[in-house]
Amino acid sequence: MASNNQQEQGEITKTELWKMIFRSLFLQSSFNYERMQAGGWLYSLMPALKKVHKKKDELAAAMKRHLEFFNTHPFLITPVLGIIAAMEEQKEDPQMIRSIKVALMGPLGGIGDALLWMTLLPITAGIGVSLAKQGNASGPIVFFLLFNAVHFVLRIGGMFYGYYTGVNALKKLKAGAKAISRAASILGVTVIGGLIASYISLSLNLNINVEGNQISVQKEVLDKILPNMLPLGYTLLLYYLIKKGYSPLKLVGITICIGVIGKYIGLL
């Protein structure tokens, strides 16, 4: 009880938490392939940022930080919002906030896909369909209510759990902030590495003639040296170009051109 009273004395109140819950419904409204959910993420977090950053320049800096790339499962966004709001309230190091955010978005995205899209959706849809096949008009309504009951329990509960857990945990974790930041960075890099192998598809459709035998460059040379060598190499090339000042939109355009031309001439 004492802990709860202490939490309610913070700058962020339940009013801000409920505002963030409502705004999180619009997370995907500005989705794009440059920064994914970044616009919706910032819009959802704004009530907390306005509450804890009173000075205009501090608020602007925080808004700029939170416009960086972000992508996770849209139903599990609120636990991350709660934790980051608590960290902003505690004026934690921006690099640590960034690391925690990046570290959380990948695992929650995977958990959300497995639990919600691949488990909850088929089960609730199956119940609704079975009722509808029997001529029961309530089938679609049952599906809608069951699915969204779980959805809103996760969304609302996740916000309060994330915020209060973040507040309490941060007090204990401040001493190990550097170690936590480093661990979060390693976890984030690991997740991004897994995404490269899973989502980037790039292979050569090229054969060479060696002493009368046709050898596939991709399968019999590159894949034997290092599987997924080309996706890794292309990712590193894009990283290098970003460091050189290329905008993500320009890199998307370059990638599309390479894909279209490579497919047209039969190289990819």
Image (cartoon, grey):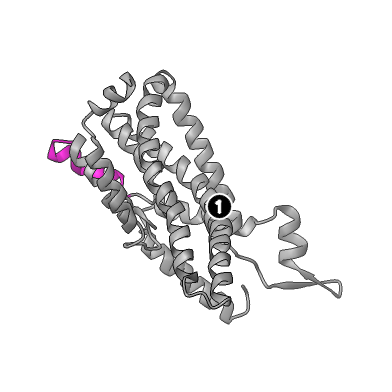
- Front residue of this view, candidates 153 and 21: 153
Q: Residue at x 29, y 34 (%)?
A: 88
Q: Compared with residue 186, is residue 122 higher up or lower down, i.e. above or below?
A: below
* Left or right of 186 in this view: 33: left
The residue at the point 30 percent across, 44 percent down is 65
Nearest the eye: 134 or 143: 134
Residue at x-position 35% and y-position 28%: 167
Q: Position of residue 9 (x, y in %)?
A: 22, 26
Quarter-wise, where is residue 47 in the image? Answer: top left
Residue 166 in the image: state x and y as whole percent: 38, 31
How many callouts does the rendering have? 1
Q: Is residue 227 in the magenta section?
A: no
Is residue 73 visible to the viewer in this orientation of the structure?
A: no
Against 45, residue 259 (above or below) is below
Which residue is denoted by mark 1 in the rendering?
A: 115
The location of residue 160, given as percent across then percent down, is 36, 38
Tell me if 92 is positioned left or right of 76 in this view: left
Left or right of 129 on screen, residue 10: left
| Highlighted magenta segment, given as a residue range | 53-67
**Within-10-Å neighbours for mark 1: few <14, some 14–19, many 20+:** few
Residue 145 appears in the picture as rendered: yes
| Quarter of the rendering occupied by the C terminus | bottom right
86 sits to left or right of 130: left
Residue pictured at 26% horizontal, 52% vertical: 43
Q: Magenta part mainly helix, strand or loop?
A: helix
